[in-house]
Amino acid sequence: MSPPDGVRIRPAGEHGLLVETGSLEAAHRLDALLRADRPAGVTEIVPGPATVLVVAPGADPDRLRPRLAAAARAARAPGPAAVAPGRLVTVPVVYDGADLDDVAALSGLTAGEVVERHTGRELVVGWLGFAPGFAYLTGLDPVLHVPRLATPRTAVPAGAVAVAGPYSAVYPSASPGGWRLLGRSPTPVWDVAADPPAVLTPGTRVRFRAVAG
Amino acid sequence: MIEVVAPGPYATVQDLGRPGYGHLGVPRSGAADAPSLRLANRLVGNPEGAAGIELTFGGAVLRFLDGGWAALTGAVCPVALPGGSAGMYAPFWVPAGGELRMGAPATGLRTYVAVRGGVDVPPVLGSRSADSLSGLGPDPLAPGRILPVGPSADLPPITVDAAPPPGDAPGVLRVLPGPRDDWFAPGALSALCAEPYEVSQDSDRVGVRLVGAPLERARSGELPSEGVVAGSLQVPPDGRPIVFLADHPPTGGYPVIAVLTAGGLAAAAQLRPGDRVRFRL
């Protein structure tokens, strides 16, 4: 059951509110609106594919709710200049990944065509999860939607560029991983000494560019 | 400086964690039982968020290379300090070279050691907490590790003689329904609160895994990944809830049926494998 104003806000404990946005695009706009004009007491703003979690240990939830509802309505029906589009980041990739030929076979393409498809579209960072700095990149060419590995690797190096399902990603640091590796980026996407530590933040637009190894 | 002679089964440096980085995939981390760390810090005149040591099942030996004030809170364990005197829930002085020895707690799981000045390892993303999920922050303590202690000259004087130790652990933890209680069969919240659950062996700082009545879903299929908070009772397909603690992933793809109150979260962090726990709306 949705409230009359059409924005559903679910409780997440004493200090959390989970705002349903209905879409990733609206989640990004709400995230941007709240970061630009952060309500008092809010410590976390975490966008997901169709929600934004807001954690506010120092706020009265009954006062925060209408504020979030108004922002969510604005995010769902943006005016002409509601929120500027995310910044564009170009990520260089050496396409020599261990799974490049397998992805080509699974998608019925040559390895060169996989590279063309992977570099041919602008992707958008949907949200982060799995590990610090691990961005789920949305908008991948549907031809490249391939299943994860049946058996994940125990070690994937930092900078590995991979695909799985409808997403692409750049591994921010070495970790286990079940995505299929297309190549590697010489540019780090995660640095704990930087502010922010992640290059790929929600809403950032990403273009991959093939470079020689 | 403090030398870790023995860390016990598992010990880490913890402060109040890394809030504000959830959207970048960074767990909050920090003391699992945050009120206990805050209290230990107050007892030695530290800011509440100073870094201390979180012991799991006690059993640690710490040598204070310089003299210093310390305090112990959380799970009550036997304490010995040859050449000095020490106990739980009150500040005490450890002479230079003194060896603080902690035994195993009879109940509860996590004991906090605060030292005046705070444990001064280098912060990562604004926190000195060891995050067991992401690996951010200092490594778990190992024998021989030297921990620097921060300056204390500018700290306020110690004004508290002793704090009351906690009473018996609450056997009943309060939960608030949602955010995804509508993903479960109508009787699931009642089932959660009916019979006690037993804490599983594979519980850690990420979560307390529970064995008991499985919670039946009303909806199949996958929930799109969404932000989750500490204290969430996330329910994977096997129906057995996991209570998320400090090192929980900031987003999750299984529905959360209910979330513990802040008091319930601190109590959950003291649950040990084999303990039984009840939930109440």
Image: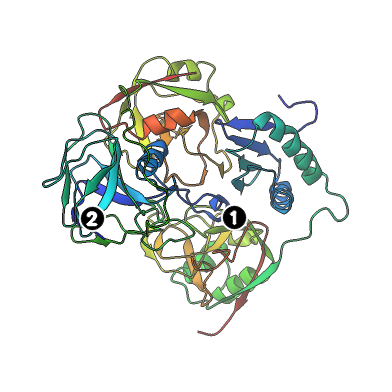
Instruction: Tell me if residue B141 comes above or below residue B232 in the rendering.
Output: below
Residue A64: name its quadrant.
top right
Residue at the (75%, 41%) spot, across then down: A72
Residue type, numbered disc 1 = Pro
Residue A12: name its quadrant.
top right
Labels 2, 1: front one: 2
Chain containing the residue with disc 2: B
Q: Nearer the viewer, residue B86 or B35?
A: B86
- Residue B31 is left or right of residue A148, and the answer is left
Q: Position of residue B115 (x, y in %)?
A: 31, 50
Label 2 crowd bin: few (<14), some (14–19), many (20+), radius 10 Å: some
Q: Position of residue A193 (x, y in %)?
A: 50, 68
Instruction: Give the SS element for disc 1.
Output: loop
Instruction: Tell me if residue A52 comes above or below residue B264 in the rendering.
Output: below
- Residue found at the far left of this picture: B82
Residue at the (38%, 38%) spot, across then down: B39
The residue to which callout 1 is attached is A166
- Residue found at the far right of this picture: A80
Instruction: Give the SS element for disc 2.
Output: loop
Q: Is residue B111 visible?
A: no
Q: Is residue B200 visible?
A: yes
| Quarter of the picture holding the N terminus of chain A | top right
Q: Position of residue A43 (x, y in %)?
A: 59, 46
Label 1 crowd bin: few (<14), some (14–19), many (20+), radius 10 Å: some
The residue to which callout 2 is attached is B67
Residue at the (27%, 34%) spot, across then down: B75
Residue type, numbered disc 2 = Gly
Q: Nearer the viewer, residue A105 or B197?
A: B197
Q: CA distance from mark 2 to mark 1?
A: 58 Å
Q: Nearer the viewer, residue A48 or A60?
A: A60
**Is the residue at mark 2 from the same chain as the one at mark 1?**
no
